[in-house]
Image: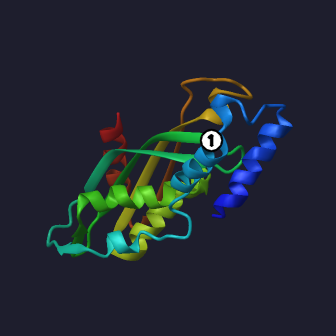
Amino acid sequence: MDRQKVIKAVEDLLDALGEDRQREGLKDTPRRVADAYAELLSGEGKTAEEHLSRTFKSDGGEMVVERDIDFSSLCEHHLMPFFGKITIAYIPQGKVVGISKLARTVEVFSKRLQIQERLTSAIAEEIMRCLKPKGVMVVCEAEHTCMTCRGVKKPGSKTVTYALSGDFPKEKRDEVFKLLK
């Protein structure tokens, strides 16, 4: 990200909105916005491989579920936030990963311009690629501010997406959905 270009773009936006960039509340806004975007888009160009490569041997083949991983992201359509919770379930095949690494994987993919459908799929694909489990399921439930603050203005509405990869039997899927209720 080119910070100087972001600062200039925010200055131009404030001018276009008819704002006085020199007034007290706006003096540092272009820099603050650049800092915010640097943080919000910090996953751009990264993979979660560094997090998912630290594994532990596991002889058990029972499903591992980490639920309610909070996240926030930026909708690429309106540059507005969407946020919610992600649940990751996978069926190990000889190795497991530390549970914090699943949350770090969510961070890598949520910190970029994104749509929820791609976010959900990307997490599942990366876990499948790095851990090589029998199967993985990712469920994402999010509230989109482009739906709640503008347009149809429906606060509280949630969008649910899920992605499956590998062999994830129906009874295991049902188990995950039951855990989410």
Disc 1: which residue: 28
- Where is residue 130 shown, x and y percent of the image? 38, 75
| Residue at screen point 45% across, 62% down | 124
Relative placement, left or right, of 62 versus 29 is: left
Q: Is residue 122 above or below residue 59?
A: above
Q: Is residue 5 above or below residue 31?
A: below
Q: Nearer the viewer, residue 82 or 159?
A: 82
| Residue at screen point 72% across, 59% down | 5
Relative placement, left or right, of 147 versus 116 is: right
Residue type at mark 1 is: Asp
| Residue at screen point 63% across, 23% down | 154
Number of labels in the image equals 1
Say which element carries label 1. loop
| Residue at screen point 62% across, 45% down | 33
- Where is residue 62 shown, x and y percent of the image? 21, 61
Tell me the quadrant of the picture where the C terminus can be found: top left
Q: Is residue 25 above or below residue 1?
A: above
